Amino acid sequence: MPQKLPSLKPAEMINALDKAGFKIVRQTGSHVIMWKPGLKRPIPVPIHQKELKRTLQTRIIKQAGLTPEQFKAFL
């Protein structure tokens, strides 16, 4: 049975996506916009002091085209 994703702060999510090959395109307001060649759309990651909710983490990982197991390797 797959383990749950750990609770992540936005900076940890951004660092993991950076290790996965994503680059920060810009920061607009309270969101960092990340992109990787081959994706149809950029990925917005909210920036705040709280940890990201697990549902939001799952959506970001899915938008990135990664499985939770692949994503955990970049943490």
Image: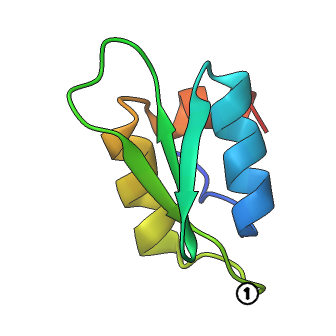
Q: Which amino acid, mark 1?
A: Lys
* Residue toward you, 38 or 2: 38
Left or right for 23, reference 66: right
Considering every residue shown, the one lying at the far bottom of the view is 50
Q: Is residue 23 left or right of residue 57?
A: right
Left or right of 14? Residue 28 is left
Say if 51 sits above or below 73 in the image. Answer: below
Q: Is residue 45 above or below residue 54?
A: above
Describe the element under mark 1 as helix, strand or loop: loop
Q: Nearer the viewer, residue 53 or 36?
A: 36
At horizontal 62% and vertical 57% (from top left) the residue drawn is 5
Question: Do we see residue 75 in this rendering?
Answer: yes
Residue 73, given in percent of the width and then of the height, sits at: 72, 27
Question: How many numbered marks, from 0 up?
Answer: 1
Image coordinates for residue 14, horizontal then vertical, percent: 69, 48
Q: Residue 69, position in %: x, y?
A: 56, 33
Q: Residues within 10 Å of mark 1 (few under 14, many from 20)?
A: few
Query: Where is residue 46, by image quadrant?
Result: bottom right
Q: Position of residue 52 (x, y in %)?
A: 61, 75
Residue at 55 percent across and 47 percent down: it is 26
The residue closer to the viewer here, 19 or 28, is 28
Quickly name the residue at label 1: 50
Eyeballing the image, is 31 above or below 58? below
**Quadrant in which the C terminus is drawn:** top right
Q: Quadrant of residue 7?
A: bottom right
Q: Quadrant of residue 15?
A: top right
Q: Residue at x 68, y 52 (%)?
A: 13
Q: Nearer the viewer, residue 26 or 16?
A: 26
Residue beneath the point at 25% across and 37% down? 41
